[in-house]
Structures are given as structure tokens and as C-alpha cells.
Amino acid sequence: MTAADSGGVKAGEGRESQALRDAGRADKWSVGWILVAVGLWMWFAFLMLSSYGPESYDGVPRCEGPLIAPLQRDGYLCDSELRQWPALLGILALSSIATVVAAATTVYAKLLSRLAKASGPETARASRPETAQASGPQSEC
């Protein structure tokens, strides 16, 4: 055991605090994955719904989003590589994967936190009977 591992804490408390640190770290990763998933979903929604392309004389973009006008005639003005269905399905797949990873990481972090908190009092209870038996028989009054 190194000095960084012990940190001046008892062995049982060290394991519990290490487990709580791991749970906190997993919780931070889950928040990060949630932010990535939300960002990808917002990007997907923006590409599907927003108008784009050069503006006409009245200031309105000439091309509608693929969800609003799916059968829009193709022209050189409305050619956007990110608005084509293969690219949109790729972004949808990435956002779905990020969502599943965020959910799994969140569940793992919550489970790890609960296990770390639940294991703390049990180790303290388990060590008490051993110390009572080691001190010898006690007489009852």
C-alpha cells in the first residue's frame, strides 16, 4: 500500500472512501455523457427542423428542413451534405449510442454509490463483535 492509498485513514474507512470516490467519478462521467447525448440530440433536431440555404428576396431561406419538407425538389441551392438522410441517420445513431451509454453510466454510478454507502455500516458492525469477543466473557448483571 502506498502513501497515496492510505492517506492516514483506517483500512475500512479507506475502502469506503475509495468506493465513494469511484462513485463520484462515475457520476461525473455520467453527467458528461448526458451532456454529449443532449448536444447530439439538439444537433439532430436542428438539422431536421431548421431552414437553410441562400435567402430569397424577402429574407426567408429557400430550403426547408428534411422533416418539414421531406420531398423538396433537389437543386444546387439546397444541396447540404448534413441534410441528406444518410448523414442524418448517422447523427441519429450517434445520439442513440450516447444516450444508451449515458443511461448505463448513470445506473452504474447510482448503484456504485449505494453499494459504497451500504457497505460502510456493515464493516463497522462486523468489526464490533470481534472486539467484544476478544476482550473476554462479560458477566451479566
Image: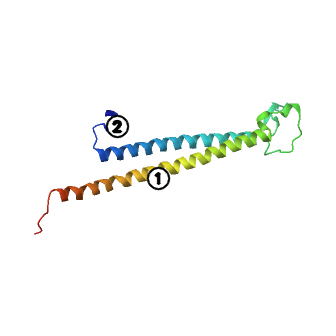
Label 1, residues with CA under 10 Å away: few <14, some 14-19, many ≥20: few
In the rendered structure, the answer to whether residue 26 lies left or right of residue 87 reads left
**Which is nearer the eye, 100 or 124?**
124
Q: Which mark is residue 33?
A: none
Callout in the foreground (1, 2): 2
Q: Is residue 117 above or below residue 36?
A: below
Q: Going from the N terminus, do you reach mark 1 or mark 2 first?
A: 2
Give residue 33's quadrant in the image.
top right
**Residue 5, label in figure:** 2
Amino acid type shown at disc 2: Asp
Q: Is residue 119 above or below residue 39?
A: below
Q: For residue 111, say whether it is visible.
A: yes
| Between 22 and 35, the one nearer to me in the picture | 22
Could you say whether the residue bearing mark 1 is in a helix, strand or loop? helix
Q: CA distance from mark 1 to mark 2?
A: 23 Å
The residue identified by callout 1 is 111
Q: Is residue 48 above or below residue 117?
A: above
Assess disc 2: are there few (<14), some (14-19) or many (≥20) residues with their C-alpha within 10 Å of its C-alpha: few
Is 4 located above or below residue 122 in the figure?
above
- Give the residue displayed 57% in from the left and 49% down from the top: 103
Q: How many marks?
A: 2
Give how far across and how far down residue 112 sits, in percent: 45, 50
Instruction: Please state the horizontal and vertical placement of residue 91, each as a whole percent of the image.
Output: 70, 40
Nearest the camera: 23 or 52?
23
Residue pictured at 61% horizontal, 48% vertical? 100
Give the quadrant of the C terminus.
bottom left
Hey, what amino acid is under mark 1?
Answer: Leu
Is residue 65 visible to the viewer in this orientation of the structure?
Answer: no
Q: Are marks 1 and 2 in contact (CB under 8 Å)?
A: no
Residue 78 location (% of width, % of height): 84, 34
Percent from the top left, x then y, of residue 106?
52, 48
